[in-house]
Structure formats: structure tokens, C-alpha cells
């Protein structure tokens, strides 16, 4: 498994936590940061997946 996949997954989880906390405390900025971090994590995870596919080929 490529390190990008691990880091990307961690960013997705961190983003989900930020979104949840932002909703609970009513902080729209924190919620927006969380959503952005989730997207960034998903992209990085996809890049890692592509690298894995290339490496396995």
C-alpha cells in the first residue's frame, strides 16, 4: 500500500471529525475546513491507488 493512500485516509478521517465538531459547536469555518480536508484526502488516496496499480503491473 502506497503511503499516499495511508495519508489520504487519515486526512479523510480528520476532515470528518472537523465537520462533526464544526456542526456541534456551530463553527462554519471549521466545518468548511473539514470538508476541504476530506476532498484533499480522497484525492491523495486516489493518487496512492494509482501508484499501487502501476507498481503491481
Image (cartoon, rainbow, N blue to C red):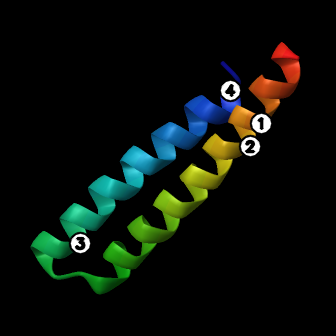
Figure check: 4 above or below 37: above
Question: Which label is found at residue 32?
Answer: none
Front residue of this view, candidates 39 and 31: 39
Residue sitting at x 56%, y 51%: 41
Question: Which label is found at residue 22?
Answer: 3
**SS for dot 2:** helix
> Dividing the picture into quarters, in which one does residue 31 lie?
bottom left
In the rendering, at what x and y percent does residue 20 appear?
A: 21, 63
> Dividing the picture into quarters, in which one does residue 8 lie?
top right
Q: Which residue is mark 1?
A: 50
Image marks 3 and 4: residues in contact by CB distance under 8 Å:
no
Q: Earlier in the sequence, mark 1 or mark 4?
A: 4
Q: Could you give the CA–CA distance between mark 1 and mark 2, rounded to whole angstroms?
A: 5 Å
Image marks 1 and 2: residues in contact by CB distance under 8 Å:
yes
Q: Which residue is mark 4?
A: 3
- Count of numbered badges drawn on the protein: 4
> Which mark is in front, 3 or 2?
2
Q: Earlier in the sequence, mark 3 or mark 2?
A: 3
Amino acid at each position: 500500500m502506497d503511503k499516499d493512500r495511508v495519508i489520504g485516509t487519515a486526512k479523510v478521517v480528520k476532515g470528518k471529525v472537523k465537520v462533526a465538531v464544526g456542526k456541534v459547536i456551530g463553527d462554519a469555518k471549521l466545518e468548511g475546513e473539514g470538508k476541504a480536508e476530506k476532498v484533499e484526502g480522497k484525492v491523495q488516496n486516489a493518487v496512492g491507488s494509482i501508484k499501487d496499480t502501476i507498481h503491481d503491473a
